[in-house]
Image (cartoon, rainbow, N blue to C red):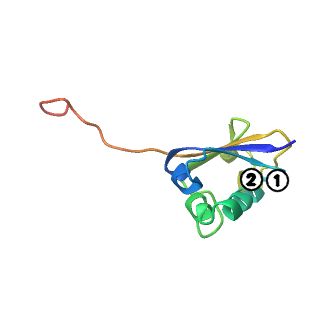
């Protein structure tokens, strides 16, 4: 059985518009990221910092649970796991007229 990896936000620009990838197996989240980087060179640098820690604006979930609430990048994965990689989105507010409240 495989792992399913869903990539959202601006990171999908690096995957050639593919937002879902299958991996045959991976032992943990770090292994998932390394395998993704082998398929999509450079994506690891968008997900991890220079210390191989998840960047603060990137959220990674294993079966809908944040790795920040688990063992971080060392979180184990299993066959059939669903991994979500979701960069945070930030922006300003727009107003239809007048002054901001």
Tell me residue 74's x, y (percent): 77, 55
Seen from this angle, which residue lies furthest bottom?
A: 50
Q: Is residue 94 above or below residue 15?
A: above
Residue drawn at the location 79% of the way across and 44% of the way down: 3
Q: Which is closer to the viewer, label 1 or label 2?
A: 1
Tell me residue 19's x, y (percent): 60, 44
Query: Quick check: 75 left or right of 85?
Result: right
26 or 58: nearer the eye?
Answer: 26
The mark tally for this picture is 2
Mark 2: few/some/many CA within 10 Å (<14, 14-19, 20+): many
Quick one: quadrant of the N terminus?
A: top right
- Quarter of the image for residue 8 reads top right
Labels 1 and 2 touching (C-beta < 8 A): yes
Where residue 26 is drawn, which disc sits there?
1
Q: Secondary structure at mark 1?
A: loop
Q: CA distance from mark 1 to mark 2?
A: 7 Å
Q: Secondary structure at mark 2?
A: helix
Name the residue that disc number 2 marks: 29
Query: Quick check: 7 left or right of 32?
Result: left
- Quarter of the image for residue 80 reads top right
Tell me residue 15's x, y (percent): 59, 54
């Amino acid at each position: 059985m495989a792992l399913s990896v869903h990539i959202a936000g601006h990171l999908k620009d690096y995957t050639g518009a593919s937002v879902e990838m299958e991996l045959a197996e991976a032992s943990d989240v770090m292994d998932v990221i390394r395998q993704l980087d082998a398929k999509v060179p450079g994506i690891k640098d968008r997900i991890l910092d220079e210390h191989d820690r998840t960047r603060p604006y990137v959220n990674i979930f294993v079966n809908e649970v944040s790795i920040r609430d688990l063992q971080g990048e060392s979180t184990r994965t299993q066959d059939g796991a669903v991994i979500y990689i979701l960069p945070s989105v930030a922006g300003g507010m727009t107003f239809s007229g007048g002054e901001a409240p």
